Image (cartoon, grey):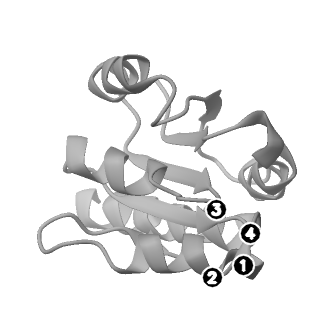
Amino acid sequence: MVDISVIMGSESDRSIANRATSVLEKSKYTYEVMVISAHRNPEELDSYISSTDAKVFIAIAGLSAALPGVVASRTKRPVVGVPVSAKLGGLDALLSMAQMPPGVPVGSVGIDNGANGAYFALRILDLIDTIKA
C-alpha cells in the first residue's frame, strides 16, 4: 500500500521529483516514484492510475504538461501538479495545470517546486487522518 504516487512525465524531470521525495522521506507516509508519459504511454498510465492504491498523486511535467490533467481526468483522488521549466520559463506548464476545465481540478504549485508539491500532498493526507480520528 502506498500513500502518495509521484509520477514524472519523463526521466528529465527527475531532479524535480527528487525535491519532492526529499520532503516525503521525512514524513510518516509511503510513496513511490513512476515515470509514465501521458503522451507516449497512455495505456500504461491508465492502467497504473486504476490499479494503484495511492491516496494522492503528485504529477510532474513540463512542455505541454498534460500529465497532471490526464491523471485528474482518470481519478477522483487529489492531484498536485508540479510544472517544470522546460520551455517558456515553465509558464506554459503552469498555465496548462491551472487552467483545467470544470470538474477536473489540479492543485498547482510553483514552477520547479517539487518540495511544495510534496508539502501540499502531505497536508491533504494529514487532513484525511484528522477527519478519520
User: Pointers 1 and 4 in contact (CB under 8 A)?
Assistant: yes
Residue for point 53% across, 59% down: 64
Q: Residues within 10 Å of mark 1 (few under 14, many from 20)?
A: few
Residue at image location 71% in from the left, 51% down from the top: 24
Q: Secondary structure at mark 3?
A: helix
Alpha-carbon span between mark 1 and mark 4: 4 Å
Q: Which residue is mark 4?
A: 87
Task: Quote the CA–CA distance across marks 4 and 2.
Answer: 8 Å
Snapshot quadrant of residue 12:
top right
Q: Given contact means CB atoms under 8 Å apart, are the residues at marks 2 and 1 in contact?
A: yes
Front residue of 12/121: it is 12
Residue 91: mark in rendering: 2
Asked if 66 appears above or below 10 in the picture, the reply is below
For marks 3 and 4 on the same chain, the one whose residue lies earlier in the sequence: 4
**If the image is split into quadrants, where does the C terminus sit?**
bottom left
State the residue position of label 1: 88
Q: Are marks 3 and 4 in contact (CB under 8 Å)?
A: no
Of circles 3 and 4, the one toward us is: 4
Residue 63 occupies quadrant: bottom right
Where residue 27 sits in the image (x, y, percent)?
Answer: 69, 53
The amino acid type, in three-letter code, at marker 2 is Leu
User: Where is mark 3, residue-wise?
Assistant: 118
Distance (Cα) linking label 3 and label 2? 20 Å
**Residue ID at (53%, 58%):** 65
In this view, the mark in front (1 or 3): 1
Left or right of 102 in this view: 4: right
Question: Residues under labels 1 and 3: Cα distance?
Answer: 24 Å
Query: Badge 2: how crowded within 10 Å, few (<14), some, or many (20+)?
Result: some
Kind of element beneath mark 4 = loop
Residue 35 lies, in percent from the top left, at 64, 29
Q: Nearer the viewer, mark 3 or mark 2?
A: 2
Q: CA distance from mark 2 to mark 1?
A: 6 Å
